[in-house]
Amino acid sequence: MRTLNRRFFIAASVICLLSGTADARSRKKKPTPAPQFSYYLLVLSYAPDFCDQPQGNKDPRECGAGRHVGFVVHGLWPQGETSRGPENCGSSPVSQAIIQATLPYIPTESLIQHEWTAHGSCSGLSVEDYFAALRKARDSVTLPDDLNQPSQELHLSPAQVEAQVAAANPSFPAASFRTSCYKDGELQEVRICLNKDLSPRACGPSAGECAASSVTILPVR
């Protein structure tokens, strides 16, 4: 009888140990919930005005004379409806294959890596799917040539810039577009608001807006 009791105790202990191990593994495998955000902000930086600023990395692929670079993708940012979205949710190296596919959109490797670390990691997407979404989002937007490749300096109100981009994208709500500007009044970015499925939508308050009455748009170099 003692032998049977001892065997029963050992068997029960083994079962409990295995069950505890399985529970621990199950707890470890629970996925981390994706950060919450409301929509995407596709941010297009205007290269000539960026290159004219005293600060920032002026890579010749973006700022070199004779490149004729207008707007470039700064990023695809998860955004809150009334506040900035989540940032810096993790980091991993972006593969060379993804970098090469994205360089026609984002001009430098360092900015590609930064955008994944700061914003893409908070999208809930894999690095491959995030940059595929970024490229698809940019391809869905048309920029008028007189804004993207101006041959002379322009002075327009933020509303005029947004109206010209809206006119080139009639399938978008007119309120899908916002501008940002530098302190010296030069145009910094055009921002486009998109749903999580990349369909166009009106911007929320968190998209920001240039408060200047007029912005300067330098000619391409």
Image (tube, rainbow, N blue to C red):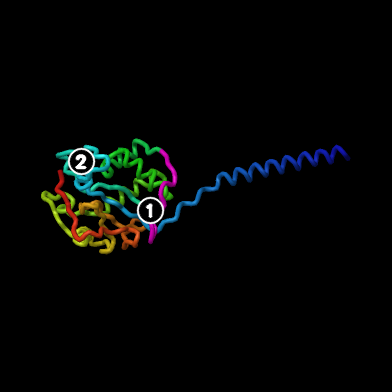
Query: Could you tell me how many numbered marks the image carries?
Result: 2
Residue 143 is situated, as x and y percent measured from the top left of the image, at 21, 53
Question: Residue at position x 57%, y 44% from top?
Answer: 28
Question: Residue at position x 15%, y 56% from top?
Answer: 155
The residue nearer to you, when weighing 63 against 185, is: 185
Residue 10 is situated, as x and y percent measured from the top left of the image, at 77, 39
Whether residue 125 is visible: no
Magenta region, main secondary structure = loop
Query: Dot 2 corresponds to which residue?
Result: 63
Residue numbers of the magenta segment: 80-92
**Residue 126 lies in what quarter of the image?**
top left
Q: Secondary structure at mark 2?
A: helix
In the image, residue 88 lies in the stretch drawn in magenta: yes
The residue nearer to you, when weighing 72 against 53, is: 53
Mark pair 1, 2: CA separation: 27 Å
Q: Quadrant of the N terminus?
A: top right
In this rendering, position of residue 195 left or right of residue 44:
right
Q: Secondary structure at mark 1?
A: strand
Instruction: Spot the residue most to the top.
Output: 96
In the image, residue 24 lies in the stretch drawn in magenta: no
**Residue 161 lies in what quarter of the image?**
bottom left
The label on residue 102 is none
In this rendering, position of residue 4 left or right of residue 80:
right
Query: Dot 1 corresponds to which residue?
Result: 78
The residue nearer to you, when weighing 195 against 74, is: 74
Residue 8 is situated, as x and y percent measured from the top left of the image, at 80, 41
**Disc 2 residue type (three-letter):** Cys
Q: Quadrant of the C terminus?
A: top left
Rendered view: 189 above or below 16 = below
